[in-house]
Amino acid sequence: IGVGYVFSWEILDFLKEPAKKAEIPLDLYYQTILEPFMVRFKIALYAGLVIAMPVILYELLAYVAPALRKREKKVMYSALSFIIFFFLVGAAFCYLYVLPVGLNWLVGQAAGRIRPVLMAGDYVGLVALLMVAVGLTFETPLLVWLVVRLGIVTPQRLHRNWRWAVLIILAFAALLTPDWNPITMMMVAVPMFLLYEGSILMAALGMRGARRRRELEED
């Protein structure tokens, strides 16, 4: 958090880039004497969570590890680096594509009739929340891989229930996008569904490969 606080203004400039990309004139304001500190603290908190994510995830896995079998421990620890990777890819996708479209649509609702007075805290909260939320949605492949590897469900069953997956994904995308703009929703929902189907395929191929290896070992 301390590192995030020191570089909070640089991080704020970074968070303002999607608005600039959408050609939105962005001047941020504050209302109270305390608000500048709170904005910097909020930025530092989000930055600290991202920086400390590997350690936090490792400690969580270490906490639950005694209750897992040896095979389950191996699967969980091997997934650790992929959790971080997919989260960062999702956050980058939101930053580069979802935010410019969503912000442009939201500001465009004013139709030039009213002018925005954007509070810095509200803007930082919205952008950070969307990046975290979309980053979490990109964990779909890893979640599917884990439940298949742990034997909770089979790829065939997941594929048969694709209609339910579409409904859940659309509902989740609607919750993630505060503007409820269909374009923004589809920009979140379509990658989620492709990741879902792709992860089922990869899990099925992985199970087939593991089955062949067991058969060769038995022979």
Image: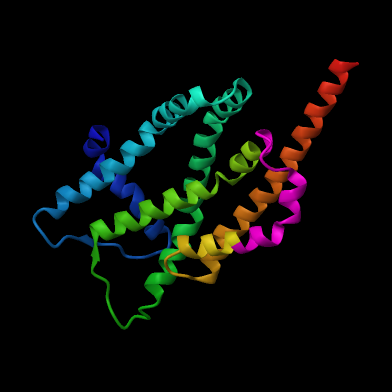
Q: Nearer the viewer, residue 81 or 123?
A: 81
Query: In screen coordinates, is 187 left or right of 43?
Result: right
Instruction: Please report the residue visible at 38 percent of the width from the left and 53 percent of the height from the top.
Output: 129
Instruction: Please report the residue visible at 35 percent of the width from the left and 51 percent of the height from the top.
Output: 15
Q: Which of the image's four quarters has the C terminus?
A: top right
Q: Nearer the viewer, residue 51 or 24?
A: 51
Which quadrant of the structure image shows residue 117?
Answer: bottom left
Query: In screen coordinates, is 161 left or right of 105?
Result: right
Query: In screen coordinates, is 104 left or right of 16?
Result: right
218 is within the stretch colored magenta: no
Q: Position of residue 5 (x, y in %)?
A: 22, 39
Range covered by the magenta-colored residues: 148-167
Instruction: Please report the residue visible at 66 percent of the width from the left and 40 percent of the height from the top.
Output: 152
Q: Nearer the viewer, residue 10 or 5?
A: 5
Q: Position of residue 182 (x, y in %)?
A: 54, 70
Colour setup of the view: rainbow
Seen in the picture, residue 161 relative to 113 is either above or below; the reply is above
Q: Position of residue 153 (x, y in %)?
A: 69, 43
Q: Position of residue 23 (x, y in %)?
A: 40, 64
Instruction: Please report the residue visible at 71 percent of the width from the left and 57 percent of the height from the top.
Output: 162
Question: Can residue 17 be spotted in the picture?
Answer: no
Seen in the picture, residue 96 relative to 202 is either above or below; the reply is below
164 is within the stretch colored magenta: yes
